Image (cartoon, helix red, strand yellow):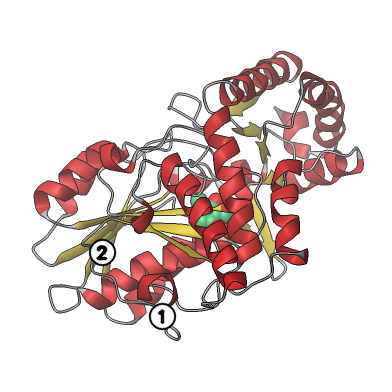
Amino acid sequence: MRPEVLAAMAPVFTENFGNASSIHWFGQQAKSMIDDARQHVARLINADVSEIVFLSGGTEADNFAIRGIAESQKARGRHIITSRIEHHAVLHTCKDLEKQGYEVTWIPVSRDGVVDPEDVRRAIRPDTILISIMHANNEIGTIQPIAEIGKIAEEADVYFHSDGVQSTGKIPVDVRALKVDLFSMSAHKIHGPKGVGALFIRKGTILKPQMTGGGHERNRRSGTENVAGIVGFGEAARLARAGLPTEMPRVATLRDRMESGLKAAIEMIHINGENSARLPNTTNIMVDYAEGEGMVISLDLKGVAVSTGSACSSGSMEPSHVLTAIGKTPDEAHGSLRFSLSTMNTEEDVDYVVGILPGIVERLRELSPHYKRA
Ligand code: PLP
């Protein structure tokens, strides 16, 4: 978290710990802090304050958007369109709906990780109730043509959700220009606290609440508000908006410096999604003949925290669905590294990576029988 975020949150744990739903002054003080935060989040994406619902994070925002539309629209149809590179919060939610009798069309992406809006147009049917396509991908950072898809959705009169967890605060977002009805956000991606996020719900959108109870958040999401988290999110959103014109280009320069440094120092590496519009802070690097987990562990020992293109779950190495969707083989996916930079990174940080990764790759390649044969 940014220090300013922590400073904004601290009083909520000490002096201003009122319940925002209480009528007394103490509660109203908390409510007013939430109102301020809502304004900052709304401004970041050009929404109205009445269109922002706070909840527990990006996962809940995606679930609420997709399940909320699926349930409210089921009399109209049961067909949903999404892409093959969505975050698991969307992917697994759609798979769950498939089990419940909904039909899902999984739109492929190009080798550069981008959805073709014409594929979305062709997939629309009379019973289509929702299109859900992420704004920017979390593994390779590719930015999707959301405004074009939004136009198609609007013409077809189909609800349009976009997972904006990765794009919010990193690139300019205008929900009006993007023509989205629903847009997911998460505080911890912009130096806010974990466990808090928001869903933009365009005025007039009919969505079945997924959390019922005391009717908080204008009856959209019940549960006593996470005042500290929301206040932290608001401050993070304010800072992100202020930094968009200056900080993000600087992060992109760092990312480019790291990519070109690594390309010069290591042979046979490729940047996944390189030819597409990408987030300024994300780079996904595929290293031939070097094993991903080995690189992650070696970098970790030297103080660099990155992730790889495979998730070691239940003992099996599952290649990333995003990397396989852009045409990578399981082996290639296993040799991919994702670096996420931020406004807190410096030139020294990226130069450090450029300095240590070649040696790590060299050692791992020596262990690879395939490399020797290449
Ligand atoms: N969607 C995307 C694209 C993400 O990158 C993430 C988190 O990594 C999420 C959703 C889930 O957000 P949260 O961690 O707030 O539940």
* Mark 2 residue's CB less than 8 Å from ligand 1: no
> Is residue 193 at least partly visible in the picture?
yes
> Residue 348: where, in percent of width, then height?
82, 21
> Is 177 located above or below residue 93 in the figure?
above
> Residue 115: where, in percent of width, then height?
33, 41
> Is 141 located above or below residue 225 in the figure?
above
Q: Residue at x 36, y 42 (%)?
A: 109
Distance CA(mark 1)–CA(mark 2): 28 Å
Check disc 2 and report the residue beneath it: 80
Is 158 placed left or right of 321 in the picture? left
Q: Residue furthest top?
A: 264
Check disc 1 and report the residue beneath it: 215
Q: Residue furthest bottom?
A: 213
Q: Residue at x 84, y 46 (%)?
A: 297
- Tag 1: residue type? Gly
Is 265 placed left or right of 87 in the picture? right
> Is 7 located above or below residue 171 in the figure?
below
Q: Quadrant of residue 300?
A: top right
Q: In the rendering, which numbered label is found on residue 50? A: none
Q: Residue at x 52, y 34 (%)?
A: 241
Around disc 1, counting alpha carbons within 10 Å, would you say few (fewer than 14), some (14 to 19), or many (20 or more)? some
Q: Quadrant of residue 255?
A: top right
The disc, 1 or 2, on the residue closer to the chain's N-terminal end is: 2
Select label 1 or label 2 by which is in front: 1
- Judging depth in this view, the residue of 362 and 308 nearest the camera is 308
> Quick check: marks 1 and 2 in contact, CB under 8 Å?
no
- Tag 2: residue type? Ile
Kind of element beneath mark 1 = loop
> Residue 86: where, in percent of width, then height?
44, 53
> Residue 36: where, in percent of width, then height?
51, 51
* Quadrant in the picture for the C terminus: top right
Where's ligand 1: which quadrant? bottom right
